[in-house]
Amino acid sequence: MGGAKNHLVVMPDANLDQAVDGIIGAGYGSAGERCMAVSVAVAVGDIADNLVEKIKLEAQKLKVAPWTDSESDMGPVISKEHKEKIENYISIGISEGANLVEDGRNFSIQGYENGYFIGPCLFDNVTKEMKIYKEEIFGPVVSVVRAKNYDEALNLVNDHNYGNGTSIYTSDGEIARHFTTNTKIGMVGVNVPIPVPMAFHSFGGWKQSLFGDHAMHGMEGIHFYTKLKTTTSRWPKSIQAGPEFIIPTN
């Protein structure tokens, strides 16, 4: 497995509440520290303002707490060094001109003041030229990119160096089929926030999101551990008399 920069495309005809639930869970679950986390929400058409506002309101409801709290929605990040790295990316995003709608820095919990906690962060007006879009932050940071139409959104997904997973939220079956057929991504979802397939299908990305020649699980995994043997045989009654001067095809 390689790096991830997973896009979730939200079409104008999508069920917006379902899309927001998907973004919240996939973007902030596990504090964004998983290869299938959604780090980019692509708002298509005129839904962007509404989408950003809904994500912001839902993000503010999340409970950030230690794993010992059964009501915790997300915990701390893995280390002090990684916390500083994420916060540095946030500062870079601001300097690049992105709008930090929700700032999770300087987050503190009583009794856990030294914990590596970062609250949910949300950027709006992120563009494909920005470092926070190009690189993998691997933290609770969701970036909203605004696309004028479906073609622009599809190009954003396909032009990125990472190709692990992507999803589209839409009510249009034709758009869904076009997206799943034409995305240059290893795992694709329709109205599913984290498109992890069942274990009997291969798990793995494309482009810089895959190291090596094989994906995990499924037939790919079986082939990886299989040593191929080929046997070619005939029996005396089926052998024609006389020598053969061509490569046999049997």
Image (cartoon, helix red, strand yellow):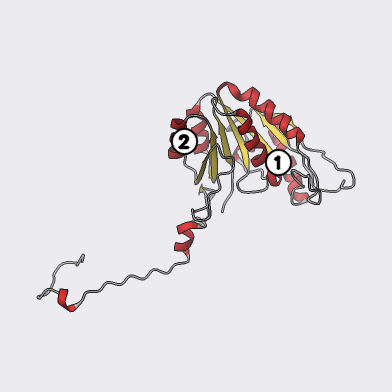
| Circle on res. 140 | 1
Q: Give the percent coordinates (x, y) of residue 44.
A: 55, 26
Residue 249 position (above or below residue 125): below
Q: Identity of the amino acid at label 1?
A: Pro
How far, Cα to Cα, is label 2 from label 1? Answer: 26 Å
Quadrant of image for the C terminus:
bottom left
Q: Position of residue 148 (x, y in %)?
A: 53, 23
Residue at the spot of label 2: 179
Point out the residue furthest to the right here.
Answer: 111
- Could you tell me if residue 95 is visible in this image? no
The answer to which of marks 2 and 1 sits earlier in the sequence is 1
Residue drawn at 66 percent across, 27 percent down? 52
Given residues 102 and 219, the one toward you in this image is: 219
Which image quarter: residue 141?
Answer: top right
Label 2 CA crowd tier, 10 Å (few <14, some 14–19, many 20+): many
Looking at the image, the residue that sits furthest to the top is: 46
Place residue 137 in its image quadrant: top right
